[in-house]
Amino acid sequence: MLIVRDFQLFPFARQVTCCGKAVHLSSREFDFLELLMRNPDQVFSRRMIFEVVWGKDRAPNGNNVDALVSRLRRKLEEAGAYILCTVRVRGVGYALQP
């Protein structure tokens, strides 16, 4: 189990809760959030994120990572998690700043 503030991520069950309430994520959203929660404050480039979430065998396509971040951020905010957010590091990538 990974815990960051009000979030609990259960890797084997592939479940996420916020303040005890289930947060329903797609497989890719879950993989991305798990990557961030396992490595708080580490900056990941779009390429690194793409390789973890979509796989190394696929070529990056447009703004897939940005769209993924947007969907994940919306779901987390709907769950009441304004304190846990992804922050775009200008020109580098994304990091979780708990």
Image: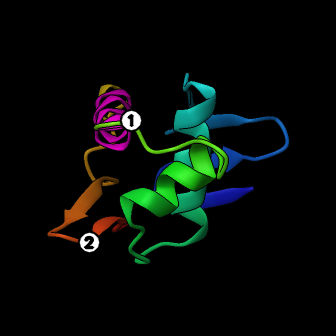
At label 2, the amino acid type is Val
| Frontmost residue, 84 versus 95 | 95
Residue at 34% over, 41% down: 69
Q: Position of residue 20 (x, y in %)?
A: 57, 35
Is 89 rendered above or below residue 17?
A: below
Left/right placement of residue 9 relative to residue 86 reads: right
Name the mark on residue 68: 1
Left/right placement of residue 12 relative to residue 27 reads: right
Name the mark on residue 92: 2
Magenta span contains residue 66:
yes
Asked which quadrant contains residue 97, the reply is bottom left
The quadrant in which the C terminus is found is bottom left
| Frontmost residue, 15 versus 47 | 47
- Residue projecting furthest to the right: 12
Give SS at disc 1.
helix
- Residue projecting furthest to the left: 90
Give SS at disc 2.
loop
Residue 76 appearing in the image: no
Magenta stretch: helix, strand or loop mostly: helix
Q: Which residues are magenta?
A: 63-75
Is 40 rendered above or below residue 12?
A: below
| Frontmost residue, 87 versus 58 | 58
